[in-house]
Structure formats: C-alpha cells, structure tokens
Amino acid sequence: MVTRIGDTNTPFQAWLRPDGRKGIRNVICVVYLVECAHHVARQIVSKCDDSEVHLIGFPGCYPNDYAYKMMEALCTHPNVGGAVLVSLGCEGFNREALKHHIEGSGRPVETYVIQNEGGTLETIRKGVEAVRRIQTIANQTPRGDMSVSELVIGTICGGSDGTSGITANPAVGRAFDTLGAAGAACIFEETGELVGCEKIMASRAITPELGAELEASVLKAEKYYTIMGYGSFAPGNAEGGLTTQEEKSMGAYSKSGSAPICGIIKPGDVPPSGGLYLLDVVPDGEPRFGFPNISDNAEIVEMIASGAHLTLFTTGRGSVVGSAISPVIKVCANPETYRKLSGDMDIDAGRIMEGRATLDEVGAEITDRVLRVAAGEQTLSEQMGHQEFILTYKTFDPVGPACLPLRGKQAF
C-alpha cells in the first residue's frame, strides 16, 4: 500500500526566484569552465561537504554556442540559488558573459580565475569561502506556494530490457497523462530511439505542421546514426530480451503516454506552457562531434537545461546514476532487477509483471512520488549523493514556428 500525500490540486512549498520562476531545490553550483579547472572545482565541492553544493561544467577549451546556452540555462535553473565560476584563465569560454547572465537573473555569483588567484590551493580556499557566502544569500530566498501546473518533468530510459516497454515505460506514460492534464510541462526525448514510431507520434500532434516536424526529427536521427555507423540498440538490450530496434522504439515511445503532443523543443529551450513536448537531442547538420549523447546523463542534463525540475528514469537492466541540480526518480521495470538493486530504485514497476499491481496503480504511484519529491522528499539517488553530470559539444538550429504552434498557451 502506498500512502498518498494528496492530489495534483495540492500546492507545495518552493523557492521563489527573483526572475519569477520557482524551484524545488536550492542548489549552489560550482562550475568549471574548462577541463583544466575541473579538479579545482571538484575540490571546492568536496571541501564544502554539503549535499546542496553541486559540481557542473564544460570541459572544452574552444567555445561552442550550444555549450554556452546550456551553461546559461543550468546556472539560472529554478533549482539553483547561486553559482561559483572556476576558470583557468586562457580557455575560450566567455566567463564574463555567463557571470553577467547569472547576475541578471538575481542570483549571487562569484568568479575565480586560477591563473590570477595563485594556483590550485589558493583558488580552492577562496572558492570554499565564496560558496559559504553565496549559500547565506541563497538561503534567504523566500518560499511560497507552487502548483503542479508550474512543474517541468522529464523522462528518459536507460538500460532497457524486454520488460521496459511492458511495465515502467507505459506506467510513466500514465503518470505523464495525469501530470500533463494538471498543467505540468512533460518532456520526453530520445529521437534515436523512436525510429519506426514517427508516423504514430505525428498522428498525436496538435497541428499537421507539427506532425511533419515530428517525423522530420526522427528521420534526422536515423540519418545521423546511419552516418555514424551506430544505433541506439546496445548489446545489453539484446541480452535483456529485446529483439529489434522497432521493439525498443515502441517501448521507449510508451513513456510519452497518450496526450496530444503540443511542441518540439531543443536543449536549453523551456516549454512555453503545460503539455507534452518532444526534446530533439540529435544535433542539426552533418555529424561533427561524434555520438549525439555518450551517456544517459548527457540527455538528463539537456532536460534540466530545458527547465526540468526532476526526471523520471526508467530502467530494466538497472542504472544507479542520479544528476546534479534536479532529482532523478528511478522506475525499475524488471522485478528481478529491483530485487538486486532495490537500494537504488524508487519505484518497483516490475510488480506489474508479477500481477501485484496494475499499470494504473503504478502510474498513480509515480505521480505521487513526483509530488513528494517536488515537496522536498529526497530520491534514493539524492540520499546516496549521486550528482552525475556531463556536457559535450553539439550544434543546433533554432526551432521553427511549426514546432511550438501554441506558444504561451495551455495545451490542455
């Protein structure tokens, strides 16, 4: 029996940001702006020894518009209360512009350039002191009511097996239907894992033009993977009982639920209203920077950059990762995996396989867990200190008007 905390009409307390958005966490980000500053930034976080101080960063020495847009979005995410920027000093990242952007959002921020501060130890010392100052300011952020209609929720699957499309993924789809109907913005992604589903997906678009864009996004992913000589079907998927790309695609697609699809966004684009959105994560143009996402956490970071307050992560084979900035709720598809990794799994959707629960019951449990986590309850990955983060090079064109046909309007 699962104890419910209330329905989707019940508000919860959130952090009220100066820019008008609301956060469910009050994280301080320590941000490295090149790999050469990674160790120093990591030591600052380690010496702070505080679960609300998170490490994020971009390792590249050369600038990239996508990476800069992502860092702007991440450092001013509703769950972020302030930031400490750590630069080596000679990298191409525009640290002054990023600092100005963060200041413009009303958040406290300080910048430290290792080449100017006296090296590793002195920068670490100053960085720790800066975190404490910024935390003091961030902790004074007022609190107030937040409704489900103000939530942004992402979903991703990783380590899928033959149970994923039967239990966890469609159960998340049920939760998305409930949360979206209550006004939340729900984001699903993985166009490389929707190959074969493009026409079915397009039939749910709220306009024919959006339907065409949905099909095009999947065809772009298919072309990209073909050129790379790589697809989303991994050996672990086959070992877990999946037999074809289409079978995996249908399972991944089921996370989206049954609501109308009201738009396409790209990493760093925030949904303009409640409803269901596809996040197109495959770069535009010819492949330039390798595989679109080298791990599940790269896609989680992109959903966070698009405003996701939390992420629903479904897995059949098992995954233990969490993320920086926004909590990850693990939904385990396989009952055997749950028994092995119960300490990492928030929801046992494998009960559906064994007749101990229905899809609707698990969907309701996922919805309730979202409400609990939004209200402050920690996920298991948060409790264990998981704060994985990765950001690499990509390039994107802006979305066109057909991708957001109801910009600023409620989709339900």
Image (cartoon, helix red, strand yellow):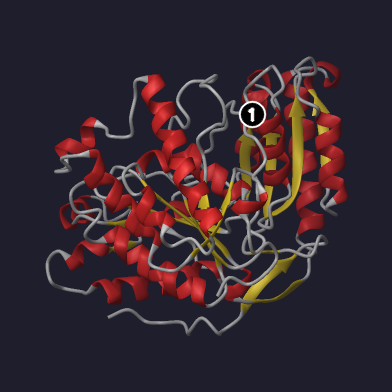
- Res. 315 in view: no
> Is 133 displayed left or right of 399 in the figure?
right
**On the image, which quarter does residue 237 sit in?**
top left
- Residue drawn at x 19%, y 67% is 351
Q: Residues within 10 Å of mark 1 (few under 14, many from 20)?
A: many
Quarter of the image with the C terminus in it: bottom right
Residue 101 point in image, percent of width and height = 83, 43
Residue at screen point 34% across, 49% down: 197
Residue at image location 69% in from the left, 35% down from the top: 31
Which residue reaches farthest front?
208
Q: Is residue 311 visible?
A: yes
Residue in front for this viewpoint, 57 or 94? 94
**Looking at the rendering, in which quadrant would you find the N terminus?**
bottom left
From this view, report whether residue 1 is shown above or below residue 67: below
Helix, strand or loop under label 1: loop
Q: Is residue 205 above or below residue 174?
A: above
Q: Residue, x 44% and y 69% (percent of image)?
A: 259
Q: Is residue 56 left or right of residue 354?
A: right
Residue 286 rendering spot, x and y as whole percentages: 53, 22
Residue assigned mark 1: 58
> Where does the image place residue 3, in percent across and percent down from the top left?
37, 82
Kind of residue at disc 1:
Phe
Towards the viewer: 306 or 47: 306
Q: Is residue 32 left or right of residue 101?
A: left
Q: Give the side of residue 329 with respect to residue 243, left or right.
A: right
